[in-house]
Image (spheres, coloured by chain):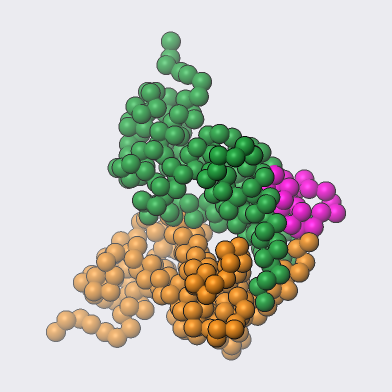
Chain colours: A orange, B green
Amino acid sequence: MARWEPGARERLIVAAVDLFAEQGYDSTTVAQIAERAGVTKSTFFRHFPDKRELLAAGQETLSRLLAEGITEAPAGATPLEAVAAGLQRASDAMGPLNREIGPRLKAAVAASTELQERDALKSVSMAAAMTAALTARGVPGAAAALAGELGLLAFKRGYAEWADTDADHGLAHYTLAALSELRAATATLG
Amino acid sequence: MARWEPGARERLIVAAVDLFAEQGYDSTTVAQIAERAGVTKSTFFRHFPDKRELLAAGQETLSRLLAEGITEAPAGATPLEAVAAGLQRASDAMGPLNREIGPRLKAAVAASTELQERDALKSVSMAAAMTAALTARGVPGAAAALAGELGLLAFKRGYAEWADTDADHGLAHYTLAALSELRAATATLG
């Protein structure tokens, strides 16, 4: 029988992020990730084509959920109400694994230029996905670009707070509060 | 006598960006860039440690100028007035070379994931530089983050328009107009 366990995907992600933080992204091999996760290399390759894609998988889902929430917001929603719906959708999909790997991933990113570039592309893609979904709703260019960036900032600021606290709220609590704070800040820019 | 000509640096940049667009970033060698620019490989290495840094050099300057303009804005300036001063400072440093390579660089970036990641990190770094300079002026966290993103959007939108037109204005004309448009859009987000 093949060596296959439920939760292997999640264990692979945690193992990879830990190894990236400990010894760097470049020095970490698929074999090491599999070993740390307690699975075989072929199990790794059943889940991910390579270590690069291991990080990308969740990122595409995130952009998709943000955009879907915006697209499916009520027709009369303002741009920021639509962004709030996107944040709600994406935040609701984030569970304990996402919360746990946040600080580890941050450490790994801080230690690797390659991961910084990938993380930056993730941010740019998230904002672009929200902006495109807003544009498709008829929001004019400048407002759509701006609301997309507000959504990105709200997600990042909310996520950082969520990962940093022991309080028993879901991620949506923090991302939506961050969006409100940013919205209030628009009035203070002069 | 060493083979050295004024303008070699600029020719190397144009040659590199053209080759990246034509045949991809990964497939382009330092030897090819030097040949296209009409200089020796040692001339290349007098200017840049590798092809990667050729792209990074201008990006660091850009972030520095944006931040300096913000830092040196009058004490009473609002966050967006300080951002406008940063845009003015950075825009004034961009000449015909920057305008000319804009569309070529865009083509090269569209064709390469690696360049997309680098371009994303450039964007994130520019926004972060502006946000840090605003924070140092005492602007609160959410407002500083937001104003930094507004500055980035204004720079990108203004630059795209500048590269796209034959009109005889400097870049600052476009980046400052984009900032005004974005500022007006903050009132339409709901």
A145 drawn magenta: no
Q: Quadrant of residue B165?
A: top right
Q: Vertical placement of B62 versus B3: above or below?
A: below
Indicate left or right for A12 with A112 as reference.
left
| Residue sitting at x 49%, y 30% | B10
| Residue sitting at x 44%, y 34% | B14
Indicate left or right for B118 with B78 as reference.
left
**x%, y% of residue A14?**
40, 74
**x%, y% of residue B108?**
39, 46
Q: Which residues are magenta?
A: B67-88
- Mark yes or no: residue A134 visible: no
Indicate left or right for B135 with B106 as reference.
right
- The N terminus of chain B, quarter of image: top left
**x%, y% of residue B81?**
76, 54
Q: Residue furthest right?
A: B76
Q: Nearer the viewer, residue B185 or A101?
A: B185
Q: Vertical placement of B126 versus B33: above or below?
A: below
Secondary structure predominantly adopted by residues drawn in magenta: helix
- The C terminus of chain B, quarter of image: bottom right
Q: Nearer the viewer, residue B115 or B153?
A: B153
| Residue sitting at x 44%, y 55% | B117
